[in-house]
Image (cartoon, coloured by chain):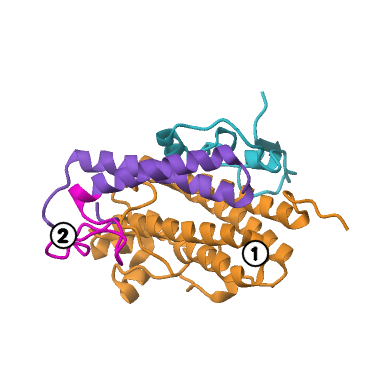
Chain colours: A purple, B orange, C cyan
Amino acid sequence: MSHKQLPKEYYELLEELQATDFVLLELTLYLDTHPNDIDAIKQFNEFAKMRKQLKKKYEKEYGPLLQYGNSYSSYPWNWDDAPWPWQV
Amino acid sequence: MWVYEKKLQYPVKVSTCNPMLAKFLIEQYGGADGELAAALRYLNQRYTIPDKVVGLLTDIGTEEFAHLEMIATMIYKLTKDATSDQMKEAGLGAHYANHDRALFYQNAAGVPWTASYIAAKGDPIADLYEDIAAEEKARATYQWIIDLSDDPDLNDSLAFLREREIVHSQRFREAVEILKEERDKKKFY
Amino acid sequence: MYTNRKYYEPYISPFDPCKPIRMKSYSTPPNLYLGFQPPGLEQFSPREALKSGTLWKVFYDPYEKNKEG
């Protein structure tokens, strides 16, 4: 795994996930100070749903994003496979 | 508890092998207004602040760890293949003598990180004003590092981090307003 | 033209050793003028938001490299 170069598609999918997560993070901070903005909550829940699908797609190709049971594992255990985020 | 996510918050690219930039960037790793200090400052204040703003401190504190990882990534990429001669020329000879290419929580002048960078007064307004000031100081530090850097890809990531300081400052200012009045439910006595 | 970058002219002494910088400047980010964020402000698309570092356009504050002043 560690000698394998990641394909161009990896970087594209990663950026899509980063963009979706960024919207969720921004809405999280916003909602922390605007707890009654129903439109923002609707947008948050929509993006949370999209995020779930993106996570599934990403993990199928490139392995788990989270562990402690927040992602499934294939065999053998693949959580600690390189590359790590600072290496890509 | 915290759960680590195996991805960066924002893509970090470095276009030139210039370890001197790592020497400047370490200010935001282990400096007074750096990302480590920010994360620990906000997470530490949560225990003695009104419940209404604990969520915000938790979420911004957590984001600061994502920024710390971005800064670490920049430093890692700038130094991982640098020779000891290149490290020396970049002003990192003293760093190399002590740490090789290991990252160390210190500022750009080599002063180790200290808990005294983090104020914790226990007064909600004093602490939130401290946080607003910390965000403005971090924004300024990013500006000065962008001024020093000629790496366009690195500056792209630094501009992202600078912009985040602006948004955090906004949210902390809103937190002060929340503590000044019950915005959503008016109380009558 | 309105800008968030503010300028001032510092005092210059005939005995200043370096070539004087006649105009100094500093940023005043857009959030300083907003107050409590109102609902429904215009957003960037997710990709643009990531690139800009903010979901809401009102906070976007590109920084120009500034080597002097």
Number of numbered discs overlaid on the protein picture: 2
Q: Residue at x 55, y 50 (%)?
A: A29
Q: Residue at x 40, y 35 (%)?
A: C47
> Which quadrant of the figure has residue B127?
bottom right
Q: Which region shows up in magenta? A: A59-84
- Residue bearing the label numbered 2: A74
Mark 2: amino acid:
Ser
Mark 1: amino acid:
Asp
Measured in 3D between alpha carbons, the distance from the residue under mark 1 to the one under mark 2, in whole angstroms, is 41 Å
Q: Nearer the viewer, residue B14 or A3?
A: A3
A76 horizontally vs B19: left or right? left
C57 horizontally vs A19: left or right? right
Q: Nearer the viewer, residue A58 or A86?
A: A58
B39 horizontally vs C12: left or right? left
Q: Position of residue A30 (x, y in %)?
A: 57, 46
- Residue bearing the label numbered 1: B51
Q: Position of residue B121 (x, y in %)?
A: 69, 72
Residue B62, relative to residue B173: is it above or below?
Answer: below
* Magenta residue check for A62: yes
Residue B15 seen in the figure: no
> Which quadrant of the figure has residue B128?
bottom right
Q: Residue at x 44, y 61 (%)?
A: B65
Label 1 resides on the chain identified as B
Q: Name the element at disc 2.
A: loop
